[in-house]
Structure formats: C-alpha cells, structure tokens
Image (tube, rainbow, N blue to C red):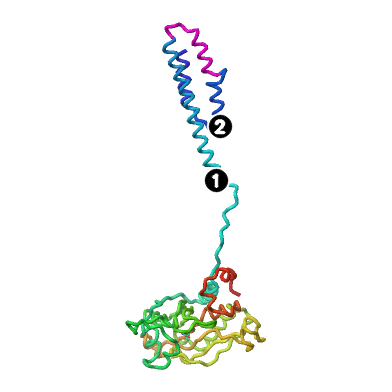
Amino acid sequence: MKELIRKYLQEASRFEATGPDELEAYRIKYLGKKGIIPELFSRFRNLDPSEKKETGKLINELKELVSNRVREQKEKLETTHSQSSAIDLSLPGEPYQLGSRHPVSIVKNEMIGILQRMGFTIAEGPDIEDDWHNFTALNFPLEHPARDMQDTFFIEKNPDILLRTHTSGVQVRVMEQNEPPIRIIAPGRVFRNEAISARAHCIFHQIEGLYIDRDVSWADLRQALLYFSKEMFGKDTQIRLRPSFFPFTEPSAELDISCMICGGKGCPVCKYSGWVEILGCGMVDPNVLASCHIDPKMYSGYAFGMGIERTALNIYQIHDLRLFFENDIRFLNQFKSAI
Ligand code: PHE
C-alpha cells in the first residue's frame, strides 16, 4: 500500500491543469467522496497497527499535496483567464486618423517625378546662403537695383549671409563643383521679406532647373518646357514665352500655360486672360558660366525656376496662400493628388 501511495504522490505532484474542468476532475479523482484519498483512509482502518504510523503519514502527505495543488492551479488559471479576457481580439481596431500629403508636397512630387523622367537629377543647397551664391555669381552686380527685385532677409551681424531668396544659388553650387554636361533640378524653400497676404508669403518653395552642355539652345529650353507643361497640366496644354529680365539669364522669359481650369476660354483663375504664369526661365548668362569656371565659348545652357505654392493655388483653385502654412487639418485633408 505504501508503494501505491508513493506512486499517487508522484502522479499528483506532476499535475498541471490546462482548464477549470480538468482541475475539477483532478480534485474529484483524489478528494471526491469515492476518490482515491477517502478510499485509502478506509483501507487504512483495516491495516496492521505496525503499518499504520507510516502509511497514515503518507496518506496525509498525499491529501495535503493534492489540496495545495488544487489551490495553486486554481489561482493560476484565474490570473491567466483574467489576463486573456482583458484583450478581446474580436474588438474592432482603434479608429486611427490617417494623414494625407500636404498639397505643396503633392504638387512638388509631381513636378519632380516629371523632371526626373526627363533626365534631371536632384541637387540641394543650404537655406542660409552667402551673397556670392545668391547674388554675385548670378550676375547681380553690387549695389545694382536688381538686388531689390527680391526683398532679402539678411543676417544682422553679417550682411554677407542671408536667407536664400531663390533656388538659383544651387545652380552656382552645382556648376562650381561639376563639369558639364549638367542636368539638375533643385527643389527647396526660399525666403523673402514681404508682407504676408493672400498672394504672397515670406516663405515659399521653388523648383530650379539647370541644363548645361555643348550647343544647348533656346529651342531645347522651349521644347523641355512644353513637354513638362503637357505632362504636368494635361496633353492639350499650350505654352507661350513672354520676354522678361533676370540678371542670370540672357535672353530671359516668363512662361505662361493655357489655363488648366478653363482651357484658355477665360475664368477667374486666369483672370479671364486664358493664360497662367508658371515660371521664369532663360539661357544661362555667359557671365554666370564664367563665375563658375565653365567656359562660355564651349558650353551653353538654360535655366528655369518655378514657384510651387503658386502652381498649387492654380491647380486646386485656392484663393489664399496663407492656408498652406496654417496647418488646419480640415484644409489639409482635402488633397489627394495633383490634377
Ligand atoms: N530665380 C528666379 C525667381 O526666383 C526664377 C528663375 C530661375 C528665372 C532660373 C530664370 C532662370 O524669380
């Protein structure tokens, strides 16, 4: 009988309940009215007195072990149960507000995508620029009134340092460091000391384009801009170039496209003219090439620069530029893709 009890002791101590039913079965098996332990006690009564001491001890040991095990396993099951019920996997997910791209980024990415497919690679320059790259190398003579075209934020302690007024400084940085052929675009933030209004802001974004090689001509510029405009604004888009002036291009022009809203018939976006101004451009001035150690007798090139906000205003028919900078989620959520 002692052997049998020892076997039960081993068996009972190894028990691990995986669920409440299994635990209850275990309890009944040992402690139930017709269970192993009451059965052992009844057999105990008929034992030879010399056997009683040791056998009684073993039965009590078994009873204690099983009672403790039932208590322990019950606690364990309760805690794992309450943990798993805290996470209800069938509940729907937390509502999660998805953001959307900023309209300026949408338009910018669209422009970059088209220009990259045309063979332009992205170049970058610093927002805080020096006078040489923003003005002097771009053929703005010192004290020349052309510097007033763009109201500049200068750094007070050092007037040689300023916030770039256009991305054209990147042209200089790239030409200084690379041999032609050069074909880059430079998207970036620019700054002008202007009163903030519905049509102007002190911060906005531009994309600059520059192509330098042998025999680059005005026809190349015109064709590149026509291709870009059709890709960006639709295949029926027409362009026109109006003579203009920039110190760093000669000749210079401004590019208009047929209005992307009315197709040229006249509407409030094009102020009933049928045309919308998109960018400034021209053939890179030989003085600029020379400033950047590129021989103007050997190489020529074209450059263009366009405002991203202004284009986004036209595409989305937004009437106030300030909305782009106010970060009102109700405004920003409305833009999914350009045209
Ligand atoms: N930098 C000019 C501007 O900010 C645009 C431009 C770029 C014009 C390149 C010609 C060539 O208005």
Q: Secondary structure at mark 1?
A: loop
Q: Main secondary structure of the magenta part?
A: helix
Find out whether residue 50 is within the magenta segment.
yes
Image quadrant in which the C terminus is located: bottom right
Q: Amino acid at mark 1?
A: Ile
Q: Nearer the viewer, residue 281 or 270?
A: 270
From mark 2 to mark 1, how far is it between C-alphas?
Answer: 20 Å
Residue 154 position within the rendered picture, expressed as x and y whole percent measured from the top left: 38, 83
Is ligand 1 less than 8 Å from the beta carbon at label 2? no
Provide the residue span drawn in magenta: 35-51
Q: Is residue 24 above or below residue 306?
A: above
* Crowding at mark 1 (Cα within 10 Å: few <14, some 14-19, many 20+): few
Left or right for 47, reference 237: left
Q: Residue at x 45, y 18 (%)?
A: 60
Mark seen at residue 20: 2
Q: Amino acid at mark 2?
A: Pro
Residue 111 position within the rendered picture, expressed as x and y whole percent measured from the top left: 53, 76
Q: Nearer the viewer, residue 161 or 3?
A: 161
Q: To which residue does mark 1 refer?
A: 87
Q: Is residue 117 visible?
A: no
Q: Is residue 294 visible?
A: yes
